[in-house]
Amino acid sequence: MPIHRNRIAGPEDTEPIENQECQTAILPNGDRHDNRKLDQIRPIFCRAGAVSQAVGSAYIELANTKIICAVYGPREVANKHEFNIQATLSCELKFATFSCQRRRRHIQDSQEKEYSQIVVQALEPVIRLDKYPKSQIDIFITVLQNDGSVLASAITAASIAIADSGIEMFDVAVGCCLRRIENLSLIDPTYLEEEGHLNNESEDDVVVNANITIALLPSLNQVSALIMNGELDGNPTQKIINDCLEGCMRIYPVVQECLTKRLQEKALRN
């Protein structure tokens, strides 16, 4: 077999350039790595109309978490003989190959498919699908950089993009994530806080670890999605959900300002 001489073969015992040790979610003194309080949300930047070719689009940043979303439609469903009284909502969420510490594949994996389904479930109660029979609305979400709270940010970005497209909605969906580790509740966790452990945690310890993501409709005061990964004790569950809902309400004014600014830009053009 011919040798590919353009590549330099490394030693057999080489390892990838990444930190193999599982780091701690919080510092030994109990503070977060970015000096935030436990209930503090990272600075948020939102912009509607980021993709000019799309019907509606949005770009959102939560510190180092960066997501862009584009919406196309409503469009007629081709080659479909069945009559649908309401529109069909589809979503494709994809991590960019360079967005994570480990390089992601070009093909959509199981996590991306799961996130896509959750976004659809969170947004279906928000959109007036009955206004668009025999049609389809496509949402494309790309994670440019992953530093935690990806699913919650994707729901918020998709909601802003749909509102920017002019599709009729009951309300906007605002997502927020919370990491529960032992007796600590970390609002808007970073990637390190989502994957890390406690300082005094050993392999034999049974520690309560859970990630909770909520999609809230602020004007209607309704929850369109609640996703939990991990285990929680029964007693603090209600308080954890209330903390997450409070985080959604703190993000809501940023979404309002973003959409208001976009509407003013459209008004000036016309």
Image: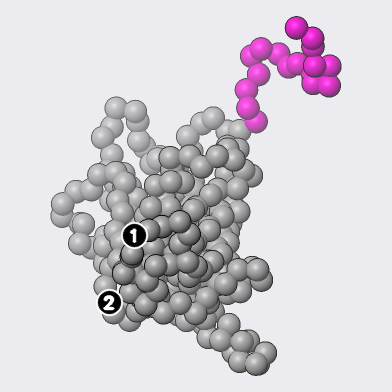
Name the quarter where the N terminus is drawn.
top right
Q: Amino acid at mark 1?
A: Glu
Q: Nearer the viewer, residue 155 or 197?
A: 155
Q: CA distance from mark 1 to mark 2?
A: 35 Å
Q: Is residue 242 magenta?
A: no
| Residue 176 locus on image (x, y percent) | 39, 63
Of mark 1 and mark 2, the one earlier in the sequence is 1
Per the image, label 1 sits on a secondary structure element best described as loop
Q: Residue furthest right?
A: 5
Q: Amino acid at mark 2?
A: Asn
Q: Residue furthest left?
A: 235
Name the quarter where the C terminus is drawn.
bottom right
The answer to whether residue 37 of the structure is visible from this angle is no
Q: Nearer the viewer, residue 198 or 87?
A: 87
Residue ID at (31%, 46%): 229
Residue ID at (37%, 55%): 118
**In this image, 65 relative to 268: left or right?**
left
Q: Which residue is mark 2?
A: 221
| Residue 82 locus on image (x, y percent) | 34, 60
| Residue 131 locus on image (x, y percent) | 37, 77
Per the image, label 2 sits on a secondary structure element best described as loop
Q: Which residues are magenta?
A: 1-17
Number of numbered callouts drawn: 2
Check the image and report above or below for 6 versus 28: above
**In this image, 43 relative to 129: left or right?**
right
Q: Is residue 16 magenta?
A: yes
The answer to whether residue 173 of the structure is visible from this angle is yes
Which of the two discs, 1 and 2, sits closer to the camera?
1
**In this image, 190 relative to 267: left or right?**
left
Which numbered circle lies on residue 209? Answer: none
Which numbered circle lies on residue 82? Answer: 1
